[in-house]
Image: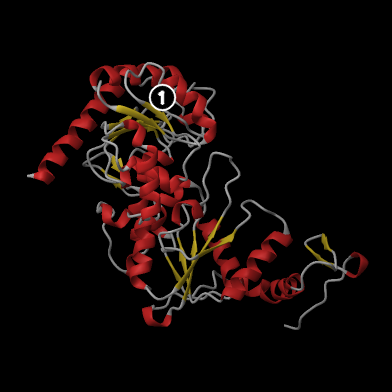
Amino acid sequence: MQPRSFPGKNGGLRWNGENLPSTQPHYLETWCIVMQESRESLRSGTGAEFLDIAPGSVKRVLIYRLGSLGDTIVTLPALHLVERTFPSAQRLMLTNIPAHAKAAASSAILNGSCLVHSYISYPVGTRSIRGLARVWWQIRRFRPDLLVYLASSRSEEMVRRDLRFFRLCGIRRIAGLPLGNLANNCYNSATDLWEQEGARLLRCLRPLGEADANDLRNWDLRLTEAERAKAREVLAAAAGRQIVACGPGTKMQAKDWGQQNWRALLDKLSAALPNHALVLVGAKEDAAASKFAAAGWKSTVLNLCGKLTPRETAAVLARAELFVGPDSGPMHLAAISGVPCAIAFAARDYPGRWFPAGLGHRIVYHRVECFHCRLEVCIEKKKDCLTSITVEEMFAAAIGAWENGQRERTSRMA
């Protein structure tokens, strides 16, 4: 097929009815030509060649994953597997910059881990030809030998749409495609739980090797000495007391258990653990709600909301004996540090899929009729799955999780 010109207004380019001014970078013209040349071939299939991958032949890996704090944390076992399989490869992540002020970017979680070396920003939901062309050009310049596809569960139509774009970027070798039964989290009838999302991603990457999602070594953030030193610095005010951590904030209305509930729970925990310090974590916007929740704590209270990076927060949480909170990023940070968690878990997704990594946690999940609604704002049912969780239930869960942690610590010391 011969390249065709795309005249627009004022000598610029035109694509899908959009005028592209001549001042745009030259990659836009190249993009339009390649789009026209590739249109027929893209209609014929995915264009992906599923080849046996010789690790030594892979020098550049592009990893595709969108989301914020929790979405990034659940990819850690997969990222460790990719690093073990391609230890000498340059690894770039194609990811989004979260729109919500309280959501952390992937780089805030992974910088310093050496699991990912750099990032390409993907404009989620964009219909702008300029934005897509810019991403296309950056990927083409990187020339990846392999795409590791770590997207969340989505329809086959969406997966194939993504693949058409990546083929347009020149990528031929792909690992992790969520097609067939790989697209869904498996249900375990013995536990009545669905497969954890990190385990599903590993199942997608099985051609690259095996990894155990229950082994916390595969969740290692590789915190730096500077990050651990920051944790010691901010916890100095606790004067050596054992720590209970709480992150009551959430960016999603459907996950919010309510300030009064958190305050009542912390009052009961303070009475049960009177010598423990309370450490509050979260975004800057969570500081006021956290202060309200902790008003009745009888011992030292450290409100660190908005004062730490996500990785510094992980270093602080690693020193806690217990974490209590909703389904949130801090929950995942505490869990991968081996801290037992007690969680008021909204039933907006299948039970198990987003449960924290590791063992010893106590999850309070009410499987109401409308569970797995995927709502971010719940008005009609008034968050029945959460409002039906009592303070007494969460208190029993918290004490149970704390006792689990104490038994585990005793067994390690024996």
Q: Which residue is mark 1?
A: 386
In this rendering, the answer to whether 247 lies above or below 39 is above
Quadrant (top left, top right, bottom left, bottom right) of the N terminus: bottom right
Identity of the residue furthest to the right in this view: 10
- Structure colour scheme: secondary structure
- In which quadrant of the rendered view does residue 81 lie? bottom left
Asked where in the image residue 405 lies, by quadrant, the reply is: top left
| Type of amino acid at the residue the image marks with label 1 | Leu
Quarter the C terminus occupies = top left
Q: Residue at x 80, y 67 (%)?
A: 24
Residue that appears at 86% across and 68% down: 12
Q: Residue 328, image x and y in percent?
A: 42, 38
Q: Is residue 149 toward the left or the right of residue 401 in the image?
A: right
Number of on-image labels: 1
Work out whether residue 339 or residue 278 is closer to the camera in this orientation and state it. 278
Q: Is residue 359 above or below residue 119?
A: above
Nearest the eye: 238 or 395: 238
Residue 157 picture location, percent across and down: 54, 57
Could one spot residue 77 in this view of the protein? yes
In the picture provided, is 206 more to the left or to the right than 110? left
- Is any atom of residue 332 visible in this view? no
Q: Residue at x 59, y 70 (%)?
A: 139
**For numbered disc 1, what is the local secondary structure?**
helix
Farthest left residue in view: 414
User: In which image quadrant can residue 295 be found?
Assistant: top left
Image location (x, y in percent) of residue 59: 45, 78
Q: Residues within 10 Å of mark 1 (few under 14, many from 20)?
A: many
**Left or right of 266 in this view: 272:** left
Percent coordinates x, y for residue 232 in the rendering: 34, 43
